[in-house]
Amino acid sequence: MTPFVKAVMEAADEIAAILREGWRREFSDHDGIGAGGDETAGIDRLAERIYIEKLSRFGKIDSEECGLVGKGEATIVLDPIDGSSNAISGLPYFGSAVALERDGKVEAAVVVNLANGDFFYKTSGGLMRTKLGEERAGPVVRRESAAIGIFEKAYANPELALALLRQKRKFRSPGAVALSLAYAHYVDFVIFAGPRRRYDFAAALWMCEDLEVVTEEELLVVAKSPETARDLLRLAHEKERA
């Protein structure tokens, strides 16, 4: 575990500890639109402040909430809370996504599920998984027997969702795309249909480089097999022509 990954874990551990103390009303309060275009909630600001304190020594930070802060050769792309609506609603599927970029290329990435402590990170040593507070990690291994996929923003794409159901492809739509991509090696597929922002994808998509990845302007398909990726892409295009 590199010093950068350790620093991300320290920050995430601090955030998770605060949340375990109990929900506060100010976590739900909104105070304007962040750099990524969405409303910023108190929980976003809390997480952002802690990450900036822990990570500023590694480079400048480009956060979904406050935009670009600090200085340095490297850039840290930060989504402080991925799935903040889930967090505010008490749904235990939310976390953080952090990527360390140098010369436009990601060299370290972390996605953490703050609700259950799952901690994914990728460096030159490969993609690993551990728990918050634990340094011992194991490699992420594909689950070839996956029974479900994940379709983020399925609510905004009912025709494609219906096409998947007609094929009897089971899926979930949990509402935190970076987290969903971090789990991509376990599920059958991950689909995201809509505009993509780098805060959500810089870290998590780099973790999927060894999978089948298809990117179009407003469609992302990640699957473990080329056949599944092609089939999902075909369904999406048929929906567009309908």
Image (cartoon, helix red, strand yellow):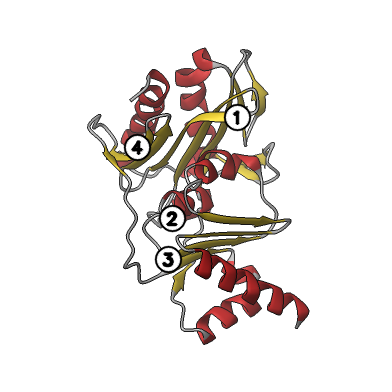
From the image, tell me which residue sits under label 4.
16
Reply above or below: 23 against 169: above
Residue 240 position within the rendered picture, expressed as x and y whole percent measured from the top left: 74, 75
Reply above or below: 149 against 70: below
Q: How far apart are labels 3 and 4 at the CA level?
A: 29 Å
Residue 70, located in which quarter of the rendered image?
top right
Q: How far apart are labels 1 and 2 at the CA level?
A: 21 Å
Image quarter of the N terminus: top left
Of helix, strand and loop, which one carries label 2?
A: loop
Label 2 crowd (10 A; few <14 / some 14-19 / many >=20): many
From the image, tell me which residue sits under label 2.
184
Proximity of marks 4 and 1: CB atoms separated by less than 8 Å: no
Reply above or below: 128 against 124: below
Q: Residue 188 bears which disc, if any?
A: 3
Return the residue found at the far right. Answer: 241
Q: How far apart are labels 4 and 1 at the CA level?
A: 29 Å
Instruction: Tell which tag, 2 or 4, sits nearer the viewer.
Output: 2
Of helix, strand and loop, which one carries label 3?
A: loop
Mark 3 or mark 4: which comes first in sequence?
A: 4
Q: Amino acid at mark 1?
A: Lys
User: What residue sits 37% from the left and 30% below the top?
Assistant: 125
Q: Amino acid at mark 2?
A: Ala
Mark 2 or mark 4: which comes first in sequence?
A: 4
Residue 242 position within the rendered picture, expressed as x and y whole percent measured from the top left: 75, 83
